[in-house]
Image (cartoon, rainbow, N blue to C red):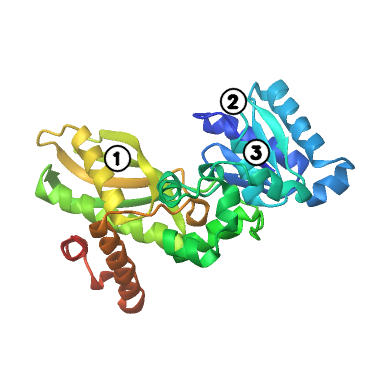
Amino acid sequence: MHVRCPDRLPEERYRQVLELLAELSPVVQALPPTAALVELKGALRYHGTDARRLGEVLRVRTLSRLGVDVRVGIGPSITVAATASGRIDAPGGVLAVAPGQVAAWLGPLPVEALHGIGPRQAAVLRDYGIHSVGLLAAVPAETVQRLLGGRAGRQAADRARGVDPRPVVPRMLPAAATVRRAFDRHVLDGADARAALLDLVVRLGILLRRRGQVARALTLTLRFAGGTSWEKTRRLAEPSAHDDDLRALAYQLMDAAGLQRGRLTGLALRGDDLVGADQVAQQISLDGAREARLVAEAAIDRVRDKFGPGVIGPATVFRHAS
């Protein structure tokens, strides 16, 4: 079961939806900020009913207890269930796809409707005449790999055929990831503050990548002499743990503070709305320079893992990745 809550649902209400899901099944995987997965195999035996009925029970409970309508997709795999929930119009509903109906149901759908296919991937497939999931399933996997890249191509080809062996992994809402820097002396906004922020960006990126997570938003906290502080949060255009993406948004946050020679005593950068990197569709990029920087980033991570975190500093990273 893949459950989609309304956009911009407050976190506390989202947690309450997760608690209702746990009443149906002990195997619930939170997909912040507003979705979740539920394993139904044991639940069906326990409740003595079918999957669609459990979806309807969930919807009635969220509406009656929380005033929240949900879109519930049900299928034999994560891809099918998530694709089904995405085909339900707001505010809510239940769509169940039986195992024997997967190929017939997926086939006519537009290729961009398949869960895990992003806009750029869909555009590439359409350029080659692959407009529906059925056509994608009919194309040899090797051809799809050439179009979308090795791993992304294999996943797209398999999922178009309804093949998705991923299990539902019990997971509560992930904690945020925070890195901090305190100054030995008061620092004025300028080169020193930017250098400190860049160091935090690199440290946060390393932390997220090692944890296999990506951030959907960043929060920057500035602490001033006298004990006052300033904090602001902005969302990333796409979930990311890459230094380039984190740096661009972190600098925007710093600019938004509108500092005029304020005396800083410390900085904190927090990655918010974390989600597993494997839960985010990998978008292909036509930007060769960006792809080169991502390759360099992965290589630098391997160097750090082998020789220690201090072997390559932030300035070196961005100088050689530019």
Q: Secondary structure at mark 2?
A: loop
Q: Which mark is residue 90?
A: 2
Q: Secondary structure at mark 3?
A: helix
Up-down: is 253 above or below 247?
Answer: above
The residue positioned 83% from the left and 46% from the top of the image is 44
Q: Which residue is mark 1?
A: 221
Up-down: is 13 above or below 269?
Answer: above
Residue 251 can be seen in this image:
yes
Q: Is residue 141 left or right of residue 234?
A: right
- Where residue 198 sits in the image (x, y, percent)? 22, 53
Residue 185 can be seen in this image:
no
- Where residue 162 sits in the image (x, y, percent)? 66, 54
Q: Quadrant of the C terminus?
A: bottom left
Going from N to C along the chain, the mark reached first, 2 or 3, is 3
Q: Amino acid at mark 1?
A: Thr
The residue positioned 71% from the left and 23% from the top of the image is 65
Q: Is residue 207 left or right of residue 115?
A: left
- Label count reads 3
Q: Amino acid at mark 2?
A: Ala
Going from N to C along the chain, the mark reached first, 1 or 2, is 2
Front residue of 50/265: it is 50
Up-down: is 229 above or below 286?
Answer: above
Front residue of 160/175: it is 160
Front residue of 237/144: it is 144
Q: Quadrant of the N terminus?
A: top right
Q: Which residue is mark 3?
A: 18
